[in-house]
Image (tube, rainbow, N blue to C red):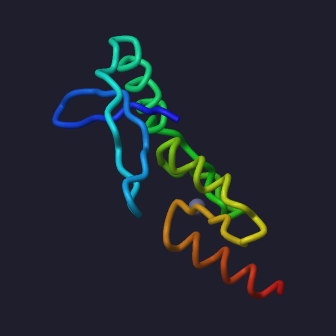
Amino acid sequence: MSFIWRMNGSFYLAERVRVGTEWKNKIIRRATEDEIKLYLELREHKYITVYMTCDNPSCDRSVRTTRNRKMKLRTEDPKKGRLEFVYCSKACREKHLSDLTAKG
Ligand SMILES: [Zn+2]
């Protein structure tokens, strides 16, 4: 599968190739204007600022983050128990975690 690779300020269409035991980026050709535009748009989309509600149920404040981080936080496999809580402050975090512990 090919992807856009940014190197020394230029954009290339590249693919992963196996060289011996290592995977390396192999340049196929220079990226076209359209490909560069799409790449930059997607990148921007990932880093756009979003707000998540504080996970302390008694708090209505929002936490500023990036869409990329939000996606990561909310799409980790729950079976691994790796969904992370998001808090607006350290106090909220401590309060919620102690409430959870108290109930368990
Ligand atoms: Zn909060």
Q: In this view, does 77 lie above or below 96?
A: above
Q: In this view, does 33 lie above or below 96?
A: above
Q: In this view, does 18 lie above or below 4?
A: below
Find residue 23 and report its image quarter.
bottom left
Report the residue at 50% width, 66% height from top: 89
Q: Measured from the top left, where is residue 98 in percent x and y?
A: 68, 83
Report the residue at 58% width, 69% height from top: 92
Q: In this view, does 28 lie above or below 89?
A: above
Q: Measured from the top left, where is residue 52 in percent x and y?
A: 59, 48
Give the side of residue 24 with respect to residue 71, left or right. left
Q: Measured from the top left, where is residue 68 in percent x and y?
A: 51, 45
Quadrant of the frame with the C terminus: bottom right
Give the side of residue 41 with respect to residue 98, left or right. left
* Residue occupying the far right of the picture: 104
Report the residue at 57% width, 49% height from top: 70
Give the side of residue 81 with respect to residue 11, left or right. right
49, 57: nearer the viewer: 49
Give the side of residue 31 with respect to residue 49, left or right. left
39, 59: nearer the viewer: 39
Q: Quadrant of ligand 1?
A: bottom right
* Residue occupying the far front of the picture: 20
51, 30: nearer the viewer: 30
Find residue 26 and report its image quarter.
top left
Report the residue at 75% width, 64% height from top: 78
* Residue occupying the far left of the picture: 8
